[in-house]
Amino acid sequence: MAEVEEVTEGCRLPVLRRNQDNEDEWPLAEILSVKDISGRKLFYVHYIDFNKRLDEWVTHDRLDLKKIQFPKKEAKTPTKNGLPGSRPSSPERDVRKTLDLSLQPAATPSSGKTLPIPVQITLRFNLPKEREAVPGSPDQPLSSSSCVQPNHRSTKRKVEVVSPATPIPAPTETTQASVFPQNGSARRAVPAQPGRKRKSNCLGTDEDSQDSSDGIPSAPRMTGSLVSDRSHDDIITRMKNIECIELGRHRLKPWYFSPYPQELTTLPVLYLCEFCLKYVKSLKCLQRHLTKCDLRHPPGNEIYRKGTISFFEIDGRKNKSYSQNLCLLAKCFLDHKTLYYDTDPFLFYVMTEYDSKGFHIVGYFSKEKESTEDYNVACILTLPPYQRRGYGKLLIEFSYELSKVEGKTGTPEKPLSDLGLLSYRSYWSQTILEILMNLKSETGERPQITINEISEITSIKKEDVISTLQYLNLINYYKGQYILTLSEDIVDGHERAMLKRILRIDSKCLHFTPKDWSKRGKW
């Protein structure tokens, strides 16, 4: 058995932790750093195949030293100019995994055929024979509720696709797999082509979209994608550097690295003003700051208020200090985004909750003033104290409400974090199912709707609509045509989910006038 002194950075071994069920488990972990405090060794561990937010400092008694794996020795390899070079042996395995992710065959429908784009979608109800025997009932338009028969569990609601034209892209990496990646941090392997830069795909999960193919990062675009390129990852940025943040009445434990000033990273608690987000090193400094800070809400224009919920629009150029402080705070909880100190190309929409002391930040999303890829969200975050309370979906719904006013369809910038992915997947599913279930016909014929019409009604980009239908497995081949089938299980599940969704955006409370940023020489 190895001794504690032999445990170094790069070693892998089982580490004791408590899971969600409060049970002990021993997942494999990698030692990222070792420090000595008063003669007591602490080890910073990353649990393999777990999210980085679970990384933590542990003592030696939680390490299983019997199963330790020491880091492999670096193998010497010749470089292009013939001089000796070295590289670790592990990245080769990572590249192979990346290639497997990108080259695995796309999931296809059970029929094994390419899905055509529905030019026209007809909502049709297949009723049991005894139901069809009712005089006049098959020809009458049915409401959403009348098609669900509790006595017939096999009853299904079908949406028939008529007159197929151009093919829907099969659920390949750029459609379903990209919008709903199994691993949010997975990258597509793109063959290197000298002198050619990778082009970012609006639906891709390409984290390197800002980099040239040889791995040398290019200068950031002024239009400002916030996707983290991962080319500057090192042992420092892989470790949480802030122990605790006090924001108003909440204390937050950061999940990831954030580039706050180095001298603040050694403090047990970092104090933030909850109104201007200025960071200070002590409670006394914060109290002194609060006597001078006259803000009781985020700077900018309040463009929405209903009940205690308000949204403020903040220009990254006009309120640069606040925007930068907001980015620093958000980076503590977002791993897939990078931080730009030049906030000029962005607008920030901050959601707040009002009480007698002021407007307290709940979450926010940012968007580019001009987006060539139709992004309506660059970063989106609900602060941990407010998560699992419906605020995430409210932020998403508000971003699409702005897109409706602008007369555009939008999509979030990829890749999404694991929690962001779940929220968007749920929002898209609920929004599209709500439309399909509420379709009615005024002429007595079957109700009809197209993919483009769904996209126009919801402002959800067409590719996201298609990928959501594929993810929900609603598209089926029936009697020579592609139809959308809503089973009773899907209908019941949707109705239960909508009963829990209490917080909704009221478009009447929105006071927003979109600006044409392309006509402004300087923002």
Image (tube, helix red, strand yellow):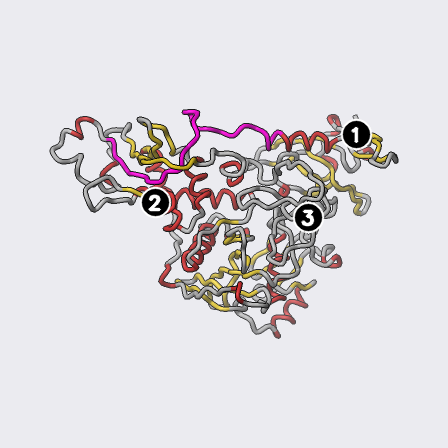
Q: Please report the bounds of the magenta region as a residue range.
A: 100-126
Disc 1/disc 3 C-alpha distance (Å): 25 Å
Q: Earlier in the sequence, mark 1 or mark 3?
A: 1
Q: Quadrant of the N terminus?
A: top right
Residue 26 image point, x, y percent: 65, 30
* Disc 2: which residue: 434
Q: Position of residue 195 (x, y in %)?
A: 71, 44
Circle 3: element type: loop
Q: Are marks 1 and 2 in contact (CB under 8 Å)?
A: no
The residue singled out by tag 3 in the image is 240
Q: Which residue is mark 1?
A: 72
Q: Are dots 3 and 2 in contact, CB under 8 Å? A: no
Q: Label 3 neighbourhood size at 10 Å, few (<14), some (14-19), many (20+)?
A: many
Residue drawn at (80%, 36%) of the image: 8
Indicate left or right for 450 with 95 as reference. Answer: left
Q: Is residue 200 left or right of residue 423?
A: right
Kindly identify the residue that appears in the image at 68 percent across and 32 percent down: 95
